[in-house]
Image: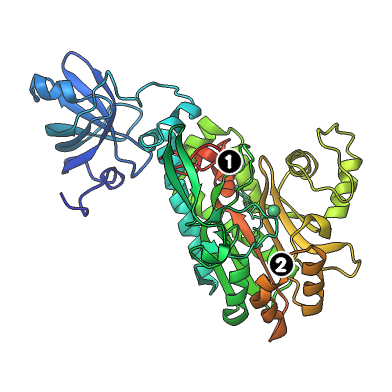
Amino acid sequence: MDYRRTYLRDLFNLAPGSKTSAYGWIKTRRDSKTVHFVQLSDGSTFQDLQVVIPEGLLSEAVLKTLTTGASVRFDGEIVQSPGENQPIELLASGAEVYGPADPAEYPLQKKGATMEFLREIGHLRGRGNTFGAVFRVRNAAADAIHQFFQKRGFNYINTPIITASDAEGAGAMFQVTTLVGHEETKDGLRYKLDKTDPAEDFFGKPSYLTVSGQLEAETLALGLTNVYTFGPTFRAENSNSARHLAEFWMVEPEMAFCSLEGNMNLAEEFLKEVIATVMERCPKDFEFFNQRIEPTLFETLNHVVNSPFERLTYTEAVKMLEASGESFEFPVGWGTDLQSEHERWLTEKKVGRPVILTDYPKEIKAFYMRQNEDGKTVRAMDVLAPRIGEIIGGSQREERLDVLEARIKELGLPIEAYWWYLDLRRYGSVPHAGFGLGFERLLMYITGMKNIRDVIPYHRTPGSAEF
Ligand code: 4AD
Ligand code: MG
């Protein structure tokens, strides 16, 4: 068994008459008087292979183990299929079962299992249609993202996962410490604090899982000009929504000598190219998503790829929302953060395609965003998409040392911790900008999946760290 053998993906390109072997897991099995039919899948493509097993070819003992979930190799010949569902099938001349799966116990055989149930058997769901498609598309999207940046001369960098600085200044961080141990007590397992001085902790000071690689990406952009990160980020927000994870993957480009306009242009080109590339690479998976998951998928994605994004200021958007006559759950007014219902109204009802909102009030955005002359707003941009709301958040960065220092102090952030970040403004500062794309938000958008837990292999959310 070599990795260079034929996968089902390649097998569909073989001419009738070819002798070959097919490896995979059995999806279903059906019997008639003269033949047995098996649907075989190996995850290399959406399409299952139909295997035809003539009666009498295999012993009763082997036949009995050809059940849903069993792993098997069939040897045989490619023949044209009389059925409508597939162009070719495999006429078996032999079989070897590697691992049977007891039909009385195998959890992944119910048709119409709910997404919630499939999450509980996350270790097996990758064998089904939906999650095979989700993870093939996830792979294609990751590849398309790297290609997009590589073609444009951006350098892929890796920023630290453990950090001592709060990149967003929002405080929703997981602490990393070796000062806490466990002990068995008569009440069960309990935490035990060995020491209380942060100076004695592993890194000699309080440290955390990063919420964003942006600040470190800025340091490398101010040297390599164009860089991007693509890595895991962590947020300890206690939010159990369908759009939030405690561990998610973020793509963060950062560009020196670039303003907010350039940043918006990059974000728009980026979303369009990545979506178009993935749709072209995974047509069968998209057909499935469009038929079974989200009936407007093709329509909305084609629309995104082909029409220019709307660009509005926050102030303009708030006026539109106030004039909308809609009764929102959360009130809108200048100065308040937009809720997902507001973002969806703007993109779905008002504009009908993605919207880039800019120039938000400084109070609701992070400390590093460049301040506008009005003294009230900053050069922020959020890209909002129909169905899911915010998909990208970014900004032009404050490059003026005095303005940045004043803002950090005003917000009461620990200025000493940002000494290196301020040095970038002290020596050779330049206008620069960047953004962060939530990879799972993008995947929800392009697959039509309704819950962010279903576009990542194993979700980390409050109360859940299984697998
Ligand atoms: O808007 P955010 O917080 O921006 C930043 O972190 C900036 N430092 C990015 C930058 O300019 N380099 O997060 C960026 C994106 C959001 O637009 C959203 O798509 C996603 O990250 N995101 C989440 N995705 C899943 N679960 C969460 N809890 C998320 N929080 C943010
Ligand atoms: Mg944001």
Q: Few, some or many C-alpha atoms within 10 Å of disc 1 (few <14, some 14-19, many ≥20)?
A: some
**Earlier sequence position, callout 2 versus callout 1:** 1
37 relative to 355 in the view: left or right: left
- Label 1 belongs to which residue? 298
Residue 379, placed above or below residue 246: below
Three-letter code for the amino acid on which mark 1 is drawn = Phe
Depth order, front residue of 296/147? 147
Q: How many marks?
A: 2
300 relative to 370 in the view: left or right: left
| Picture quadrant where residue 36 is located | top left
| Picture quadrant where residue 57 is located | top left
Q: Give the x, y percent position of residue 115.
A: 49, 29
* Residue at image point 45% right, 52% down: 140
Q: Give the x, y percent position of residue 69.
A: 28, 29
- Label 2 belongs to which residue? 414
Q: Colour scheme of this structure image?
A: rainbow
Q: Give the x, y percent position of residue 449.
A: 55, 37
Q: Few, some or many C-alpha atoms within 10 Å of disc 2 (few <14, some 14-19, many ≥20)?
A: few
Residue 284 makes an appearance in the image: no
Residue 199 makes an appearance in the image: yes
Three-letter code for the amino acid on which mark 2 is drawn = Pro
* Tag 1 secondary structure: helix
| Picture quadrant where residue 259 is located | bottom right
* Tag 2 secondary structure: loop
Residue 55, placed above or below residue 187: above
120 relative to 377 in the view: left or right: left
